[in-house]
Image (cartoon, rainbow, N blue to C red):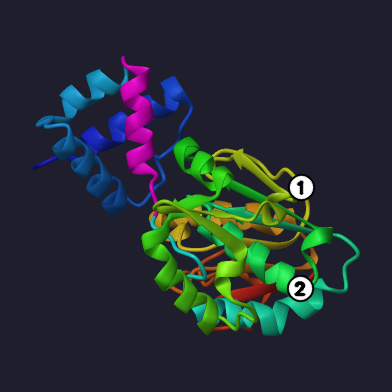
Amino acid sequence: MNIDNNEIKKLLESIKSIYGYDFTEYSESSVRRRIEHFMNSRKIEELDKLSKLILNDEKLFEEFIQQISVTVTEMFRDPLFYMSLRNNIIPRLASYPFIKIWIAGCATGEEVYSIAILLKESGLLERTIIYATDINQNSLKIAKEGIYSVENMKSHTVNYQKSGGTKSFSEYYISKYNSVMFDKSLKQNMVFSPHNLAIDKSFNEFQIILCRNVLIYFNQTLQNKVINLFYESLCSFGFLALGNKESLLFSDNRKNFDEIDHKEKIFRRNN
């Protein structure tokens, strides 16, 4: 499949104009790959045909959005990251009387429940509100329900144990048929909401923001814009956690952050 870059840019501009979703500053290779996957799955051979279809059919466009914004995640992904949170960040969060956390690009919610479990084991969950946002409405629905396939629990349990978990992981969910549902006590202080990092603004002040394995899908301009958004959204000396393949190196705001954990990409606002 040979798609001209200018055709992709034209499509993304049309989507932004008609639907308000801005993918114009997403990584070119990532967008191309996901568009091609969508076209192959629908047996659409030409981008011009795809454009006409999704710009005139809102239902198909919603399916397109789910495809282009989908992310892969798991419970306690990168266990050493969560170990670092336990050792380096949680004790500092404990000094706040009330804690606000933003998980940006929360996908289907596995990271949200991982953080809730970590906070529960640290005795901080009851005085914390976790704001979980994503552009993908279908992913948010799954995250809010907190129901996942039982097939993944074995690997999730291993991750939990490697992260320094202190209990039996099965205490946090109930199994039914081929699914598990996470305990309602974990959900009490969760707020799920759509948020588009490309165009939406700051909506609160947070002690810690997690946005892991999301920036890699953005071009440099959008990465810088999002880091600025996070800076504005953090309280003084608040924490920012990125994915281990991401960096503040090229951000205009890098001077305003101190590195807490180089390997796990955890930073602290220094003003």
Q: Is the C-beta separation of discs 2 and 1 under 8 Å?
A: no
Secondary structure at numbered mark 1: loop
Left or right of 37? Residue 88 is: right
Quadrant housing residue 151: bottom left
What residue sits 33% from the left and 40% below the top?
Answer: 67
Q: Disc 2 or 1, which lies upstream in sequence?
A: 1
Q: Position of residue 113 (x, y in %)?
A: 60, 59
The majority secondary structure of the magenta stretch comes to: helix
Residue numbers of the magenta segment:
56-71
Left or right of 90? Residue 250 is: left
Q: Amino acid at mark 2?
A: Asn
What residue did someone put label 1 on?
204
Left or right of 213? Residue 89 is: right
Q: Position of residue 196 (x, y in %)?
A: 54, 40
Quadrant housing residue 112: bottom right
Secondary structure at numbered mark 2: loop
Q: Nearer the viewer, residue 106 or 110?
A: 110
- Residue 6: say if magenta: no
Q: Nearer the viewer, residue 119 or 257?
A: 119
Q: Which mark is residue 270?
A: 2
Quadrant in which the N terminus is drawn: top left
- The residue lying furthest to the right in this view is 97
- The residue lying furthest to the front in this view is 177
Q: Nearer the viewer, residue 159 or 250?
A: 159
- Tell me the crowding category of disc 1: few under 14, some 14 to 19, or many 20 or more residues within 10 angstroms, Cα based: few
Q: Is residue 264 visible?
A: no
